[in-house]
Image: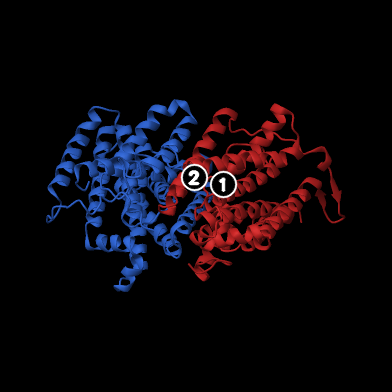
Amino acid sequence: MAMTENETGENVSFRKEVGMPRLHKVIFLVLLCFLIALPFMVYPIFAMKVMCFALFAAAFNLLLGFGGLLSFGHAAYFGGASYVAAHAAKVWGFTPELAVLAGTLAAALLGLAIGSLAIRRQGIYFAMVTLAFAQMVYFFALQAEFTGGEDGIQSVPRGELFGLFSLQDNISLYFFVLVVTFGGILALYRIVHSPFGQVLKAIRENEPRAISLGYQVNRYKLMVFTLSATFAGLAGATKSQVFQLASLTDVHWSMSGEVVLMTLLGGMGTIFGPIVGAAVIVTMQNYLATFGAWVTIIQGVIFVLGVLLFREGIVGVISRLLKRRL
Amino acid sequence: MGQLLLGLINGSFYAVLSLGLAVIFGLLNIINFSHGAQYMMGAFVAWMLLNYLGIGYWPALVLAPLIVGATGIVLEKVALSRLYKLDHLYGLLLTFGIALILQGLFRNYYGISGLPYQIPASLSGGQNLGFMFLPNYRAWIVVASVVVCFATWFMIEKTRLGAYLRAATENPALVGAFGINVPRMITLTYGFGVALAAFAGVLAAPIYAVNPNMGADLIIVVFAVVVIGGMGSIMGAIVTGYGLGLIEGLTRVFYPEGSAVVIFVIMAIVLLIKPEGLFGRAA
């Protein structure tokens, strides 16, 4: 079950430090500075898209990279939250932060419900179960009244943050998205490095042993599944505010595949891998958008090559070369 | 009645596809995510044989599975065989990538509108059974799928070759020690499973439009079927396939809105009551 291949080997000794290692602090700080400058260099909407997907991939990585559970249905939480947030903002007139919160909460509940069923099976079956439930959510989104079927929920108003600050302007919206996604990624970092995260790794490495040590393995699995769904939902809800749109694309299985690809390419089980993976894939989609079906083909090729030759991912390789955990 | 027949036809596809998945899973321990794409390829190869080479339905029914099965063998040799020592989830990811490539390629060259494929002349028309009209081709699908399922079951459970196969599923190292070429058996098994998918694709070509996405949504339902049945037994996969097709057909009669999700709901219930699947061995 454990996908530990990309964990740096035991021959590498890690410096014991209390709190966040300095290297990680520096990387996060540099990243933050870069992100603050970014909207003045590239199209802000594009930058926001990258950040939403980075959070989505980081949430997914919590489950796969640290929990060892491969979900093939994460689009359900991403897209589900995006629908709820869009609906809340448009029909109920929620302010952006409340709309995002509502979407995230919906994703958490959905994750709790699906997770409690899915953790009854392991490995390949787990992947199939999550995929099947996500497809169920997809059909629901296709048929339900409030989702608008094929059209989705369009022209969601951007509203005013806390009822005070207008987010009409791309730059102010950008900083809202920056705070939400960066905060989300830091929270995920904290979860991974908490005692809870350590137990997760123990379960991933050797489940029977964790059970024999007295851990309620299923509770941990359900907890990490729900957390992962929650943060995926946070990403999806935020995305719906950025694009003012919730559509079937967000709940489709190909979206579940994309997030797997981002995590795999960036390096699963690494901290910064999903961010890098998301940035690469979204940029690629952006530049290849005019080539239509070729995007799918190229993604497939990256998948195949990634699995065959490059299982550590980009950050995984860098981490091995630097002999530092990234 | 008509809906029940439709259900039975869907069930035929579920049965043949989940059978292929179960055969592959039994020996390779991977879930073949590209199964849906290979089913789609079967339909496309039949279409190409007809339109480029003038080869009709009946030869295509044999040729298309052979051709697609051969591509499966190449795929196993070149890529899948490198992953057996790793976590099985990598096999899933690899075949997912293959599925994306195949779908993308066919979408690029043939569009998504769907290509027509005529029902062969010998099977057009239908029978009036008094209480309902039975199109010949639909009856043929059910018959053909039952025959193929039974033949596969017979081969695996009752022949010497099948005995080797089952033995290799239990303990590949020991079977290898007896002088049986297990890697070659694995390759051929994958090719056979893929050929089954392509066979279903050819069967489907005349009734569903041949299009690149025809396998993608179907395969997710088949995954649910496999979860419900459990992949422990060949017979289980077949019975669950037909049974769920019928249940889906019945739902379409009594509660049409629910027909798209009924299989997933059943999956949820099965997970609650018997997590290892109806015919599955406890994991």
Label placed on residue B35: 1
| Left or right: B68, with A292 as reference point | right
Image quadrant where one finds the N terminus of chain A: bottom left
In the image, A236 versus B81, the foreground residue is: B81
- How far from the left and from the top, in percent, is residue A304? 44, 40
* Chain letter for the part of the structure drawn in red: B
* Residue A139 percent across, percent down from the top left: 53, 50
Circle 1/circle 2 CB separation < 8 Å: yes
Q: Residues within 10 Å of mark 2 (few under 14, many from 20)?
A: many
Locate residue B198 relative to residue A26 in the image: left or right.
right
Q: What residue type is labelled 1?
A: His
Q: Which residue is drawn at 58% across and 30% down?
A: B111
Q: Nearer the viewer, residue A238 or B110?
A: B110
Labelled disc at residue B95: 2
Residue B250 visible somewhere in the drawing? no
For disc 2, the chain is: B
- Check if mark 1 and mark 2 are on a common chain: yes
Between the C-alphas of marks 1 and 2, the distance is 8 Å
Residue B69 location, quadrant: top right
Towards the viewer: B247 or B138: B138
The number of discs equals 2
Residue A184 in view here: yes
Q: Quick one: which chain is blue?
A: A
Vertical placement of residue A325 versus B165, above or below: above
Residue B163 location in percent, x, y?
62, 61
Given residues B101 and A98, the one toward you in this image is B101
The residue located at (44%, 38%) in the rendering is A154
Chain where mark 1 sits: B
Which color scheme did the rendering employ for the protein? by chain
